[in-house]
């Protein structure tokens, strides 16, 4: 019996909003992409620092995203192969995570899927950096992002410890390409740095579409 | 050593964003109240249901709040005496919590402080309902809210089990009044249903001011 007199017995219930998940498109709630819920990106080319952390290279970089009329500051980006999220059970070859903080400390991550195709100029610059060859700039940073900014949105978590919950996820529906050679070079450095799919627990997932 | 092979060993770290907190106004980040981050309330007078839950009466009611250009649906409201949040160490006689869900399932609570003064018409209707005397309407529901909608904003938690984290808190700076007789009647039903103050853990707290 929980009481106000013995508050130390209260436990925080958690684990119901973990990421990544399999996004089942048929059960998404459709929302019209309008002026109010668009995503606008304005990222710097400069890399502030590169950190090796938890089976990944973390690219600390600055910039702004405006999402749903809220301003977020880019903190870092990194990549997972294969993708962590899935769409209707389908995984992709690579997933980029662009991690932001909001004005109130809220975490927001923009996710981009990559499939095998032509070489990606931005990923090439990042790969060269991981291979110890490059400068501190990603000149083609916008090559990470699809032109069409339709997205899925849900509340999840970080996908690495401490697995912090209530992260706002924005995952672009349109995929980008990297070459097979680029994927192989990434996998040589980080082989399968992908968290298992987590239960959806009847969360609301928005499909924000034109 | 945490690895991708033994993901079952990863633990969710939590407890760093619990509510209520003492809002220290000197360390708040000031933000200008503008068209973009205003709070607009449009609540129904009708009470859908009253539930007795965890040392409180929960008034299930419908309506909308528009906060920071996002739409939230009112789910329920309830009251704590004394207040749960504090401002610079000062508690208030009563605190109303108006609990909403956002379009993505995000929880948002609007908090209002009440001090002893003249009778509050909306609280009178709610009190009568708690005393088993009234109808299913709170005709003066807007009497719960101050005219000036400046607020504090931070990310916290529910203040009762399951203590779910990453709740968006919006706490009006301007207080409202209830009569001493009204407070005594509430305390006769719920005596001290107030959670202890929780550590701030260096969270960002916004002071959104004209």
Image (cartoon, coloured by chain):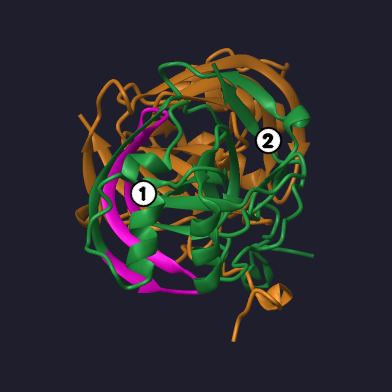
Chain colours: A green, B orange
**Residue displayed at 73% across by 31% down:** A25
Q: Main secondary structure of the magenta part?
A: strand
The disc numbered 2 marks a residue on which chain? A
Q: Is residue B98 above or below residue A46?
A: above
Residue B57 % position (x, y):
69, 39
**Residue displayed at 64% across by 20% down:** B62
Residue A131 % position (x, y):
37, 71
Q: Is residue B82 visible?
A: no
Closer-to-camera residue (A55/B103): A55
Location of the N terminus of chain B (image quadrant) = bottom right
* Membership of B46 in magenta stretch: no
Location of the C terminus of chain B (image quadrant) = top left
- Mark 2 or mark 1: name the one nearer the start of the chain: 1
**Residue displayed at 57% across by 36% down:** A153
Which residues make up the magenta segment? A49-75
Q: Is residue B80 above or below residue A174?
A: below
The disc numbered 1 marks a residue on which chain? A
Q: Is residue A84 visible?
A: yes
Closer-to-camera residue (A39/A83): A83
Q: Do pointers 2 and 1 mark residues of a single chain? A: yes
Residue B46 % position (x, y):
67, 15
Q: For mark 2, give the secondary structure.
A: loop
Give the labeled residue for mark 2.
Answer: A204
Splitting the image into 4 quarters, where does residue B160 fall? bottom right
| Residue A177 - label | none
| Residue A122 - label | 1
Q: Is residue B164 above or below residue B61?
A: below
Q: For mark 1, give the secondary structure.
A: helix
């Amino acid at each position: 019996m929980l009481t106000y007199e013995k508050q130390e017995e209260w436990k925080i219930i958690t684990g119901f909003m973990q990421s990544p998940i399999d996004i089942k498109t048929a059960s998404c709630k459709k929302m019209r992409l309008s002026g109010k819920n668009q995503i606008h990106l304005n990222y710097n080319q400069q890399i502030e620092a590169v950190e090796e952390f938890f089976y990944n290279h973390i690219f600390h970089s600055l910039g702004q995203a405006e999402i749903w009329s809220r301003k977020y500051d880019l903190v870092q980006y990194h990549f997972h192969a294969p993708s962590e999220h899935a769409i209707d059970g389908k995984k992709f070859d690579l997933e980029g995570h662009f991690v932001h903080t909001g004005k109130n400390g809220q975490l927001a991550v923009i996710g981009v899927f990559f499939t095998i195709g032509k070489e990606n100029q931005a990923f090439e610059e990042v790969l060269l950096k991981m291979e110890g060859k490059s400068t501190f700039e990603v000149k083609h940073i916008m090559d990470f992002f699809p032109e069409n900014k339709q997205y899925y949105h849900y509340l999840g978590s970080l996908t690495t410890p401490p697995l912090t919950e209530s992260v706002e996820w924005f995952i672009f529906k349109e995929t980008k390409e990297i070459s097979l050679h680029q994927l192989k070079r990434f996998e040589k450095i980080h082989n399968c740095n992908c968290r298992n799919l987590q239960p959806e627990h009847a969360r609301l997932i928005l499909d924000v579409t034109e």
